[in-house]
Amino acid sequence: MQIAVLTFDGFNELDSFVAAAILNRMRPKGWMAHITAPSETVTSMNGVTIHRQQPLEFAAMADAVVIGSGIRTREIANDPAMLARIGLDPKRQLIAAQCSGTLLLAKLGLIGALPACTDLTTKPWVIEAGVSVIDAPFVAHDNVATAGGCLASNYLAAWLIARGASVADAADALHYVAPVGEKQAWVDRAMGVIEPYLDMKASAA
């Protein structure tokens, strides 16, 4: 499973790095989450500059795509040339968006009238784009999932692993990153959030 973690200038480090780190727990099984960006380097909302691992066009070839948020997402969402570089196909890809990343999904026409999750700042913009926003941390419809809140990265990563591999793999990945002394409770809570949205046939290993 090759995963594009879309990361733009002004990105939120928690969205891109936490999701990528959890997903890369699956590297022994051939998975790889790539920081995917429109330019060679991108700088986060807190001034951290990183080098991309893949160009933005890699999103069209990836098996799964995670769209993180950032302080420039609204600007990106109104840039037709940038949107044209993001080729996504929910019929063959798993697609997950977090916070303002949901706005990009809306602008790409991948949500439609379905309810979605986002952060409180982005909510009015997503509604303006014609999407119904629910007060929840995570929701999924078929191959498209959205989450709201910086610390919801674990829900998106766990959903992708459960869908692309197995529920057991998702629980194992979460267990590794969960706080010591709270691991089982933390895993149970996270899995409880995503399990209602899993295609159990696809997630059975």
Image (cartoon, rainbow, N blue to C red):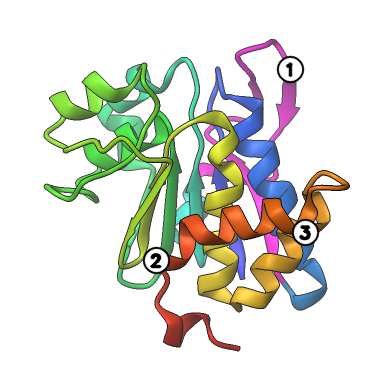
Q: Indicate the position of residue 139 as horizontal and vertical percent values.
A: 35, 52
Answer yes or no: is residue 40 visible: no
Residue at the disc numbered 3: 175
Where residue 117 appears, x then y in whole percent? 34, 39
| In the image: residue 133, left or right of residue 157 | left
Q: Amino acid at mark 3?
A: His
In this picture, is 127 found above or below 199? above
Q: Are marks 1 and 2 in contact (CB under 8 Å)?
A: no
Whether residue 185 is in magenta: the answer is no
Above or below, 127 against 194 in this view is: above
Please give left or right for residue 3 compared with residue 196 in the image. Answer: right
**Mark 1 Cα shell of 10 Å, populated few (<14), some (14-19), many (≥20):** few
Amino acid type at circle 2 is Pro
Residue at the spot of label 1: 48
Three-letter amino acid code of the residue under disc 1 = Val
Q: Which residues are magenta?
A: 31-56
**Residue holding disc 2:** 196
User: Is 71 drawn above or below residue 173 in the view shown?
Assistant: above
The kind of secondary structure element at disc 2 is helix
Is 43 part of what is drawn in magenta? yes
Q: Residues within 10 Å of mark 2 (few under 14, many from 20)?
A: few
Quarter where residue 1 is shown: bottom right
Q: Is residue 198 visible?
A: yes
- Do the residues bearing badges 2 and 3 touch, measured as CB atoms within 8 Å? no
